[in-house]
Amino acid sequence: MEDAAKLGPAEEVPENQRIQPATGALVERTSTPGGLALVSPYHTHRAGDPLDLVALAEQVQKADEFIRANATNKLMVIAEQIQHLQEQARKVLEDAHRDADLHHIACNIVKKPGNIYYLYKRESGQQYFSIISPKEWGTGCPHDFLGAYKLQYDLSWTPYEDIEKHDAQINIVNTLLSQPAALPPNTEPTFHGLTESGHS
């Protein structure tokens, strides 16, 4: 027993099985933890089974791998969100340029929100808006038809093929805005059901 007490931790653990500082750290040793002397410092200071130290090193390494994988997954989600926001920003800029160009198109009438206007191109190259559709012109349409747009109340333009979808979205928003906010009368957490089941 005395011979075992004289052996230091470095003598009990083979060199190739010691934990390196980079893989983990052990708790500092003291003979009087909390100001109290230990009855047998040997039993608290001995290194123990070398396999325990190997397992501790593996646990630290596995924790590093999980932390890295978790951070990588979160960063990938953020990267996808950034890409989506960039695409939305690009779409907003494209729509803004289109709306500005359409507002500069020649038109002999005062444009009113809510109406659909039809875009034509003359032989001279000039583009202009008209309230007459190609269907109304029939076979006598004098100029090339380029497209139709609805002027919205925010003065943006919606292409004819997107008008139905856009109007449906506006109707949903208006419905939500016309309804009072449905909030519960009491927003504080309640443990009513838990406390009753706990006493039973």
Image: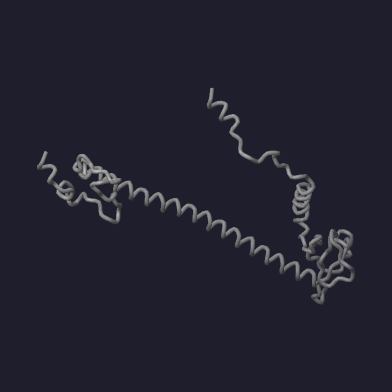
Kindly identify the residue that appears in the image at 68 percent across and 66 percent down: 94
Q: Is residue 52 above or below residue 193?
A: below
Spot occupied by residue 138 in the image (x, y as percentages of width and height):
88, 60
- Left or right side of 182 for 195: left
Q: How many numbered markers are drawn? A: 0
Q: Is residue 110 above or below residue 43?
A: below
Q: In this rendered view, identify the residue nearer to me: 2 or 180.
A: 2
Looking at the rendering, which quadrant does residue 21 occupy? Answer: bottom left
Q: Classify residue 157 by image quadrant.
A: bottom right
Left/right of residue 177 with respect to residue 134 in the rendered view: left
Instruction: Please say which color scheme the image uses.
Output: one colour
Which image quadrant: the C terminus?
top right
> Which residue is situated farthest in the left direction here?
3
The residue lying at 50 percent from left, 55 percent from top is 76
Q: Residue furthest top?
A: 200
Furthest-bottom residue in view?
Answer: 124
Q: Quadrant of the N terminus?
A: top left
Location of residue 59 in the rendering, given as x and y in whole percent from the top left corner: 33, 46
| Left/right of residue 140 with respect to residue 169 in the rendered view | right
Of 45 and 121, nearer the camera is 45
Residue 107 vs residue 121, the one in the foreground: 107
Q: Front-most of 170 and 97?
A: 170
- Could you tell me residue 37's position as x and y percent? 23, 43
Query: Which residue is drawn at the image coordinates 41% and 53% (left, top)?
Result: 68
* Position above or below: 177 against 39: below
